[in-house]
Image (tube, grey):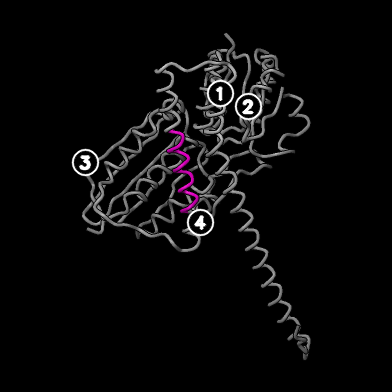
Amino acid sequence: MRTVAVADDRQARVLQNVLDSIGAALRGERGTADQFASVVSHELRSALMPISLFVEAMLVDVTQNGRVPSRDELMQRLGMFKRQLARANHDLKRLLDFSRIRSGQLDLELEDVDLSATVADVVAGHHEELAVARCTVDFESPGAIVGRWDRLRLHQVATNLLSNAIKYGAGAPIHIALSANDESARLVVRDHGPGIEADQREAIFARFERAHPTQHQSGYGVGLWVVARIVEAFGGAIEVESEPGLGATFIVRLPRLM
Amino acid sequence: MRTVLVVDDEYEIAEVVGTVLSSRGYEVALALNGKLALAALADQRPDLILLDVMMPVMTGIEVLRTVKATEEHRAIPVVMMSAVGDGVLSSEDESLTAGYLRKPFTFDELMATFARVGL
């Protein structure tokens, strides 16, 4: 260890400020890593619990109760199992993306993709959840909107925005509107949830959150953060318009790059 | 038939818990947030409420307190679910509950909790 001789009080104060800054940076990095681990842990548990519960129940049925499901029951349960696996796969991919994006490794495979068809597909894939959430979807599209995008990432953007709208706007309609000109496409997703406080509107894209135990409220998790990073990678932009109590409108603009 | 209201903002969890309980002869209603849970209670009185703590719009704690403050519903046993461990409920709120399931919980833990509640 080197010993630094400090000539006077001014130098001492400068040195102290530098040391304080280094300390703060190290504490911040450690805090970010802890928060990341907490988010990952929570998301993984949420993704895997339904599957294990489902399998355990079926095993008990067969091994302890001697009850073998009928063909129709089996098909219904296998269908649900398949959806749960697909959802868990999606959640895990989102976490992987989260990790990759944080380390600057998000690669895009650009191809001609129809945004309208992608959004329609996402809405169709959520029809059961929408029914349970008592949400109708009002989907406006001018027809095919083709751009040079990464198909999987575009699907993720639509999925995460719709999932967010369902989570916060359950019990009310969700409005999705697409529009485009030659240069860019616009995706708008509006819910009738509780809305977002002004000081949170940028924060929800700028940082990831997990549940806050002291408030008992679910946070936004990594979904919107990933959406923002993917949109940025496309050269686009995302913003949210909201007032507390009046829902939230997410607006995504994507260059078409044709 | 015994009825259960499952309240969780994670649709996958609500769906599977509901399916597992249905396969065991319970009639199940699902609600994806606290407001929908209270609306469901207005339609049908369940024999038990399985209630997630961490939810947007209206937290599980708020739902619990509302249910227990309502004469018509206060006798309904409420089992809380949460991925957060000890200390998520105050002692006062805990006294309102019939049980607590920490996520991820197993099928055996779910059934044992139901047995303890007498369902």
Residue hosting label 3? A143
Q: Which residues are magenta?
A: A83-97
Q: Label 1, on which residue?
A: B37
Q: Share a chain, discs 1 and 2?
A: yes
Badge 2 amino acid: Val
Are labels 1 and 3 on one chain? no
For the point 43% across and 54% down, which residue is it?
A228
* Residue kind at label 3, given as amino acid type: Gly
Q: Is residue A162 left or right of residue B74?
A: left
| Callout 2 crowding tier (Cα within 10 Å): few <14, some 14–19, many ≥20 | many
Residue at 75%, 29% in the rendered image:
B94
Name the chain letter of the residue that bears numbered label 4.
Answer: A
Q: Which label's residue is closer to the chain start, 3 or 4?
A: 4
Residue A99: give its label: 4
Marks 3 and 4 on same chain: yes
Callout 4 amino acid:
Ser
**Is A86 in the magenta?**
yes
Distance, label 1 to label 2, CA atoms, is 8 Å
The span from disc 3 to disc 4 (Cα, nearest Å) is 35 Å
- Where is B50 relative to A113, above or below? above
Q: Secondary structure at mark 2?
A: helix
Query: Would you place residue A27 above or below residue A241 in this image?
Result: below
Residue A53, percent from left and from top: 56, 30
Q: Nearer the viewer, mark 3 or mark 4?
A: 4
Q: Dot 4 lies on which element? A: helix
